[in-house]
Amino acid sequence: GLQEKLSNHSGKLYFGSCADPNTLNIANNVNVLKSDFGCVTPENSMKWDATEPNRGSFSYGNADTLVNWATSNGKLIRGHTLVWHSQLPGWVSNINDQTTLRSVIENHISNLAGRYAGKLYAVRTWDVCNEIFEENGSLRSSVFQRVLGESFVTIAFQAARKADSKAVLYINDYNLDSVNAKVNGMISLVNRVNAATPNTIDGIGTQMHLQGGQGSTAQAVLTALAGATVKEVAITELDIAGAPAQDYNQVVQACVNTPKCVGITVWGVSDTNSWRSNTSPLLFDGSYRPKAAYNTIIGAL
Ligand code: XIL
C-alpha cells in the first residue's frame, strides 16, 4: 500500500488519515487504514468539546477507542488538538480573567496530553495550537487571545511539554497555501516564541484543504515554513476538491523533497466520510476503491 511505498522511497515519512470510532466501525474503511496508512489523527474525539464538556469533568471514550485501535495496529497518532477557538465549550469562551483561563488551559492539557503520554510512544505529535491566525497574519480573536494575548501560545506549549515530554509539539493552520501574509505571520510568531523560550514550538503543520490548482504552490510553502526555527513540518489535513491527480502528486512530492517534512495526513479515507464530501476530495471513492490520484501518487514513488 501507500505507506509501504512511501517508506521504501523515503524511510522517514508517514502517510496518515483522520479516523475516529464512527469510521473505525466501517470494515472497508478499516481495511484501507490497515493497508495504506501508518498514522491516524482523531477527527473529533480529542477536541475540547469532546474531552472536557464541563469544567474538570473529562470524557475519553471515543479518544480511548481511537488510541487503542492505533496502538494495537501499530499506527502512529497525531494528537489533535489542545487549544482551538472552535469546537470549544461555552464555559471556556466565557472566562474573563487571566488566572482562571491560564489554569484552565494548563489543567486541560495536563489531563488530555498526560493521559496518552508514553502510550507505547504511539502519540508522536500534538497539534497544541490550531488556527490561531487571521488571514493577515495577526492573531485571531478568541478567548485565548483576548484574555492572555500572545502569551497563551507559550503557556499551552509549556503545558504540553510537561504533560508529554516525548511528543513533538506543533502549531497548525489552514490557508497556508501560498507564501502569503498568514504564512509570514506564522513564521514570525514561531521565530519570536522560540527566540524568547528556545525549544518551545517543534513543528509547523499546514492543513492543506485545497482547491484544484493549488498543488503547484505546495513546494514553495513547505520550503518557507521549514525556514522557521522548527525541527520539522508536516501536511496535516490534506484534501483537494475533485481530487486532481496532478495536485495530489505535487503535494506528496513537495513533502518528499523537503528535508524537514516528516509526513502527509489526508483528512479521511473515502469521499463518503469526508467533511467536504460533496467535493469528492479524497483518494478513495464511496466504495473505498482507489481513485486516479492514489494510483498517480503510488506510481511516482
Ligand atoms: C472537522 C471534522 O472533519 C468535522 O467532522 C467536524 O464537524 C468539524 O471539524 N480544521 C481542523 C479539523 O483542524 O479539526 C476540522 O475537522 C477541519 C478543519
Image: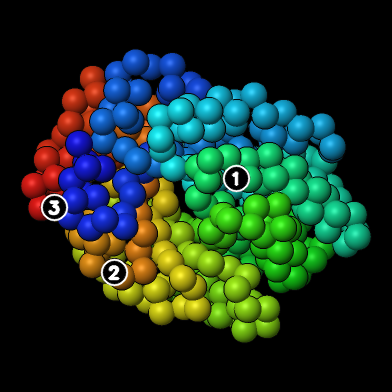
Q: CA distance from mark 2 to mark 3?
A: 15 Å
In-image side of 96 versus 224 (left or right): right
**Residue type, mark 2 in image:** Thr
In-image side of 167 versus 151 (left or right): left
**Residue type, mark 3 in image:** Leu
Seen at 58% across and 68% down, the residue is 201
Residue on which disc 3 sits: 301
The image's colouring method is: rainbow
Q: Could you say which disc has been placed on residue 258 in the image?
A: 2
Q: Earlier in the sequence, mark 1 or mark 2?
A: 1
Q: Could you say which disc has been placed on residue 118 in the image?
A: 1
Q: Secondary structure under badge 2? A: loop
Seen at 90% across and 54% down, the residue is 100
* In the foreground, 129 or 121: 121
Q: CA distance from mark 1 to mark 2?
A: 28 Å
**Residue type, mark 1 in image:** Gly
Q: Secondary structure under badge 3? A: loop
In-image side of 263 versus 106 (left or right): left
Q: Is residue 270 above or below residue 237?
A: above
Q: Earlier in the sequence, mark 3 or mark 1?
A: 1
Are there few (<14), some (14-19), or many (20+) residues within 10 Å of tag 3?
some
Residue contact between numbered discs 1 and 2, judged by CB atoms under 8 Å: no
Dividing the image into 4 quarters, which one contains the N terminus?
A: top left
Q: Is residue 267 above or below residue 246?
A: above
Q: Is residue 74 visible?
A: yes
Say which of marks 3 and 1 sits in front.
Answer: 1
Q: CA distance from mark 3 to mark 1?
A: 32 Å
Q: Pinpoint residue 180: horizontal percent, then vertical percent.
A: 41, 74
